[in-house]
Amino acid sequence: MNPQLISIRGNIDTIIFDFGGVLFDVDYQAPVREFIKLGASKFDGLYSKSAQNDLFNRLEKGEITELEFWSLLNEILQVEADYSAMEHAWNAILIGMSKSRAEWVAKMQKHYRTFILSNTNSIHVRAFERMIDEEIGIQKFKNGFEAVYYSNEIGMRKPDENVFKYVVEQNELDPARTLFIDDSIQHVAGARIAGLHAFHLDLSTTNVEAEFAEWLPI
């Protein structure tokens, strides 16, 4: 087990999970490849795991509608594709979630208060909730958490420390006993600024079940 996790394990009673990457498998490069097929060669300069154009931030905070997003994105990319084709390219990032991971989350909930805090948007939410519903059952999945927070619904996004404080205050959590898990280092930094314990999950070497296997009592 990671030394950081060993040192805090006994003091944690709450875990806040990132969604995409940590629980739901994603391919950050897939939209780049799909938009290139549509003729948008500069899409990779607009969107990546570590940084993105403010247009995506506004969508993730629910500040613009889907139609406004597609229109503004097409103004930037100048592609001859309809919104349906662009939505297909945008949703290519979404891979899926295994039943075993959902079952693992359910086991974790028996020992910790569990939450989701995700930077996302209405387009992706509609797609990944449909995927989860088909494979697992969306309500069954959500029952594994006390609350699920999507950035587009609460109007805030990581790494802003206020979004972490919001979750803490809404649920009367003790930051000193709360662990946040994310695969984006900038989000981990934001959680630490807000006073939470935070762990960067390096998806190139591990996954959440393997990294936290010992957090489940035998």
Image: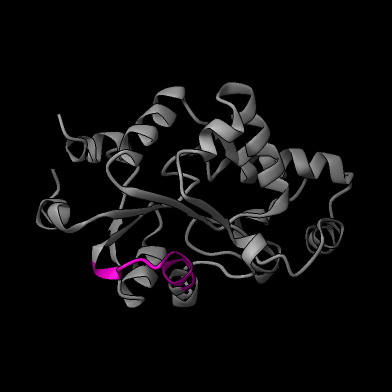
The quadrant of the image that shows the C terminus is top left
What is the image's colouring?
one colour
Return the x and y of residue 190 as percentages of the image width and height: 39, 72
Q: Main secondary structure of the magenta part?
A: helix
Q: Residue 65 versus residue 50: which sits nearer the camera?
A: 65
Magenta residues?
Answer: 166-176
Residue 37 visible in image: no
Looking at the picture, does residue 102 appear above or below residue 71?
above
Return the x and y of residue 76 as percentages of the image width and height: 79, 64
At x 82% / y 61%, what residue is drawn? 65
Residue 210 visible in image: yes
Look at the image and say whether residue 145 sits in the magenta stretch. no
Return the x and y of residue 117 as percentages of the image width and height: 49, 56
Q: Which quarter of the picture shows residue 207?
A: top left
At x 63% / y 46%, what residue is drawn? 32
Q: Is residue 158 left or right of residue 113?
A: right
At x 32% / y 33%, what residue is drawn? 107
Q: Is residue 127 left or right of residue 15?
A: right
Looking at the picture, does residue 133 appear above or below residue 78?
above
Q: Residue 6 versus residue 103: which sits nearer the camera?
A: 103
Q: Is residue 176 left or right of residue 10?
A: right
Q: Which quarter of the picture shows residue 43?
A: bottom right
Looking at the picture, does residue 140 appear above or below residue 80?
above
The quadrant of the image that shows the N terminus is top left
Return the x and y of residue 110 as percentages of the image width and height: 31, 38
